[in-house]
Image (spheres, rainbow, N blue to C red):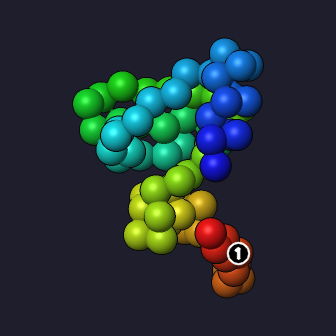
Amino acid sequence: MHFLHDIADEMGASLNYNCQVTGVDLDANTIKLENGQTFTGDIIVGADGLEGITRSMFLENQDQHIVHNVYR
């Protein structure tokens, strides 16, 4: 799945690895990292797994159960 990395890199995106996300503000498209850094962008890609913070933040105010599965 390096194609996403390659496309983002070609478009000048800032890529950060091994970062712990501690907060997500969906209204402001902003994330906060454990080290205090914040990032704002057009989209938020939550690739932190089923138990990750981004999944819980996206589903926090949802009344319906959303099911999307990705298999590799």
- Tell me: residue 47, above or below residue 21: below
Does residue 48 appear in the picture of this structure? yes
Relative to 34, 62 lies left or right: right
What residue is shown at x 55% (from left), y 21% (from top)?
14
In percent of width and height, residue 65 lies at 67, 84
- Local crowd at mark 1 within 10 Å, few (<14), some, or many (≥20)? few
User: Can the viewer see residue 26?
Assistant: no
The residue singled out by tag 1 in the image is 68
Seen from this angle, which residue lies furthest bottom? Answer: 65
Name which residue lies at 30% across and 29% down: 36
Q: Position of residue 12 (x, y in %)?
A: 66, 15
Image quarter for residue 71?
bottom right
Residue 52 shown left or right of residue 55 in the figure: left
Q: Where's the C terminus, which quadrant?
A: bottom right
Amino acid at circle 1: His
> Where is residue 41, by image quadrant?
top right
Q: Position of residue 27 (x, y in %)?
A: 64, 42
For image coordinates 40% across by 35% down, the residue present is: 17
